[in-house]
Image: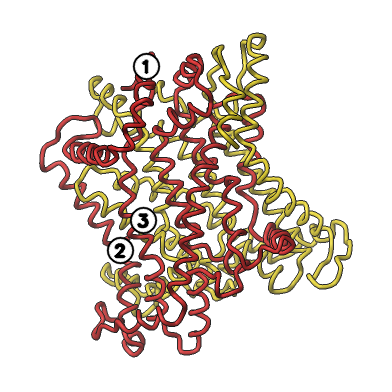
Chain colours: A yellow, B red
Amino acid sequence: MSATDVDGARAAGTGAPARSTTPLAGASGEKRRMSLTHKRNLRLGLLFISPWIIGVAVFIVYPVTYSIGLSFTRYSGMATPTWVGVQNYITAFSDPLVAKATGNTLFYAIIAVPLGLVVALTLAIAMNQNVREVAWYRTIFYAPSLIPAFAMSFIFIVFLNPQFGVFNQVIGLFGGSNVNLLGDPTGVKIAIILMAQFGAGNAALIFLAGLRNVPKTVYEAARVDGAGPIRQFFSITFPLLTPVLLFNLITGVSGALQVFTEAFVITNGSGDPDGGALFYMMYLYKTAFGFAELGYASALAVLLFLTGLALALLIFWLSRRFVNYDVDAA
Amino acid sequence: MTTSLTEHDSSAASSTAKNSSHLAERRRQRAEDADQNNRRADGTLRPWYSTLIARIVMIALSALFLLPMYWMIASSLKSNEELAKFPPTLLPQSWEFGNYVKAITAMPFLQFFANSAIITVSVVVLSVVANFIVAYGFSCIEWPGRDKVFLVVIGTLFLPFPVTLIPMFDMWARLGAVNTLFPLIIPAMFGSAFFVFLLRQFLLQIPRDMLNAARVDGASEWTILWKLVFPTARPALTTVAIFAAVGAWNDFMGPLIYLQDQRVQTLSIGLQTFRSVNAQDVSFNQLMAASFLVILPLLVLFFIFQRYFIRGITIGGFK
């Protein structure tokens, strides 16, 4: 794409396009005046998103079609796939391991997503303090997010050691008795959730960018109106953070549904004890690369994808009530 | 709340002069940062003790978040015998810097480093430019059906990775691109759902009135993108650059699949090879040394570039 292409298409919107304050509302109203502008904007919009359109066609549509096709077959990766109709989907709904993996994944998502948001926002506020050494705090809070997942998992195995790990020493300080988190089906999930919190630096950076985006003048105006720091947080900072909150929520849910590496390393690929860390993606991975049932694995992948999509739509629909894109309104 | 376009024009005109005074610009930013250190978010001067509580909280949080990194470094300096000791020692009794020498010599470190650097720099540049352009199309231009198409972007976030794994490998293999860096760099040219979504959330907050005022004045979308929107989106673009860098540098699955030839392999793969080769004598210390060496460049870069999280240039009538 060159600059001249865009310059050629030139200056859209000499009329005043309707201002959209909700994420999903298209430009509406003033229809007659807008129709010409609409056409021009449509051309321009498609031009700007054209790299993504090409990317989706090549890197998404093609492989997804391929996988959907495979989901109706029995396929080991070697012989030619055999058509089995919806058999894989019927199997999935009666497979006790799918039920177990779904339960584990939901348990993880329901705790890890809200907790992750709170931890990330706390870190972001800490990263945004006006102190001289703030560069150090930012680096320290973000540092664990840089540690490769497998190395982090090894470190955690040492931390959680039932006899000597730091975790149990801290519990001991408060008079508690030793617990072996990794030996308990619920404990292992909690351990993985706790470990994930050390990676909150990523979401925190996004919140930080959001905090840095709030115009200083809005705070000045609030101060003139006599708003204290807590009032300022809830009436200014938080509403203006809702667009990034929506982002962190959606990507958090997407990540939680696909939780894999940490559980894989910590349980050495087994998902034990007692299937407590058998998350959906782990079961999918095992089906595909362990048992070489690529057809069944594709069906599982399609089901996960559809579930995620449904959740995303639900969150977007709810987000109309709480997300505020309008800086002026604050 | 009117937007002064002459102001933007003059700032655009002076941008040519700005290139030469890049250092002055940085100095100005630093001074601004230093000034902010003594002020509240609302701009009032604050008393000296007001940061004390914040500092205590942050130091406590830091201690917690330093724990994994500390453990990594401490373990990397211990001997095998000391690692096996229970309870574990807090500080290494004898400092085994040899672990680092072994980690470096166990793989062609410089070669891997160079490959990782080429991939990372390319991916960062392409990601920032491509995602910024696409996100602009999804936020600053109002076109019919835009927000419905955007739901497709969100949808792709939920694609499980095995779905694309096999067909994509198939495609790159047929193009003869396996064992080249292309499969890891080219996709960045087309934007990613994660970054487009992230940038869109920020760009939607830019007042429409300001963009429209620029359009009335005859500015093309391309000019608005770079002259008006780019400066205000700086914190968000910084985030994209950091994530793209970390993602490319630490990417494990991609190099594992596409780079089988040692000549083109990256540090993350070197780490994995190192891990499996040494699996027998479980040299956890060397593994931690190698891991730390791999993430050290990222840590340093982050420390340098976190500065760019300064407030984006204030937009619209908010001056």
Residue B183, percent across and down? 62, 59
> Which mark, residue B66?
2
Q: What element carries label 3?
A: helix
Provide the secondary structure element on which disc 2 rests: helix
Badge 1 marks a residue whose secondary structure is helix
Question: Is B172 or A9 nearer to us in this picture?
Answer: A9
Of label 2 and label 1, which has the lower sequence position?
Answer: 1
Q: Which of marks 2 and 1 is in front?
A: 1
- Farthest left residue in view: B48
Badge 1 amino acid: Thr
Marker count (numbered)? 3
Q: Residue B6 carries which label?
A: 1
Q: Residue A220 at x, y = what percent?
A: 25, 24
Task: Name the side, left or right, on which A56 lies relative to A296.
Answer: left
Tell me whether the residue at label 1 lies in contact with that at label 3, contact meaning CB atoms closer than 8 angstroms: no
Name the disc covering residue A111, or none. Answer: none
Please state which of residues B289 and A311 is positioned toward the viewer in this rendering. B289
- Nearer to the camera, B156 or A226: B156
Chain hosting mark 3: A
Specify the quadrant of the image occupied by residue B39. Answer: top left
Q: Which chain hosts label 1?
A: B
The reply to the same-chain question for discs 3 and 2 is no
**Amino acid of disc 2:** Leu
Residue that carries the numbered disc 3 in the rendered image:
A142
